[in-house]
Image: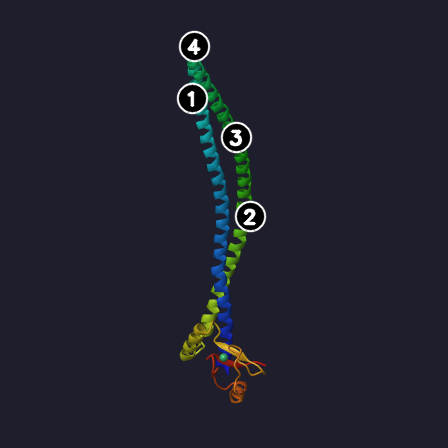
Amino acid sequence: MSELKTLVHLQEFDTKIAALETEAVRLPKQIETIHTAVAEAKKAVETVKARLDGARKDLRAREKDLDDIAVKRSKSEARLYEVKTNVEYTAVLTEIETIKGQKAQTEEEILALMERQESLAGEIREAESRLKTRDEQGKREEAVVREKLAAVEKELAGVRGERTTLVSAVPRNVLTDYERILKARGGLAIAPVGASAICGGCRVTIRPQAMQELKAATTLLHCESCGRYLYWQE
Ligand SMILES: [Zn+2]
């Protein structure tokens, strides 16, 4: 029966279309993933740059502290000549020792900050190199994916066109039924039945009477369990 053959053919198209549609959705997501990876690499560079800015700001602040400490120290040293008593003199000397301690500590902090700047500059170079690699790799990957996507869309348009032609040969009521089953049954509206007499869609055993009719292929039969159209396939 030609109607049955047409439905089998139609199912082939619809299975193909479903696979292509899945690809047409998946591939743009793949491109998004590539973009995300590049954006992350870019963000990594910016994060380290922000840290370097912070370290520079800290360094300027400590250098300013060092200037303030120097002023404080010369003021204290000048007072050594103004004090009248030994007690006052000792107090100023203690003060100067404290200031010296502050200076040493600030200088240490400055040194550490300079080292930190150097290591951050190295980290930036590494992150930038990673970004460059990721970006180049991303562009190559994206070109491949876009090419695939264009091929999928072209094929999809072709198959949809062929389907439209084929559909015109199917009676309206059969087509409506077919499409309803296709939607309800996970994209499979017509299932093969072989010598084992099992529905290729739901695995239920087909009655001998129905098997005879299937083999004769004189009428459209539905699976009693899943409702799909059935066709005999040796
Ligand atoms: Zn079935």
Query: Which residue corresponds to mark 3?
Result: 112
Query: Which residue corresponds to mark 4?
Result: 81
Within-10-Å neighbours for mark 3: few <14, some 14–19, many 20+: some
> Of marks 4 and 2, which one's residue comes earlier in the chain?
4
Spatial distance from mark 1 to mark 2, Cα to Cα? 52 Å
Are circles 1 and 2 on residues that touch, CB within 8 Å? no
> Of marks 1 and 4, which one's residue comes earlier in the chain?
1
Q: Where's residue 158, x and y in %?
A: 49, 65
Secondary structure under tag 4 reads loop
Are circles 1 and 4 on residues that touch, CB within 8 Å? no
Of marks 1 and 4, the one in the foreground: 4
Are circles 2 and 3 on residues that touch, CB within 8 Å? no
Three-letter code, disc 4: Tyr
Q: Nearer the viewer, residue 49 or 3?
A: 49
Spatial distance from mark 3 to mark 1, Cα to Cα? 20 Å
Three-letter code, disc 2: Gln
**What residue appears at the point 46 percent right and 19 percent down from the top-left corner?**
94
Of marks 4 and 2, the one in the foreground: 4
The answer to whether one can see residue 162 in this image is yes
**What residue appears at the point 43 percent right and 14 percent down from the top-left corner?**
87
> Of marks 1 and 2, which one's residue comes earlier in the chain?
1
Spatial distance from mark 4 to mark 2, Cα to Cα? 72 Å
Q: Where's residue 146, x and y in %?
A: 51, 54
> Of marks 2 and 3, which one's residue comes earlier in the chain?
3
Spatial distance from mark 4 to mark 3, Cα to Cα? 36 Å
Indicate which disc residue 137 carries.
2
Secondary structure under tag 2 reads helix
Query: Which residue corresponds to mark 1?
Result: 68
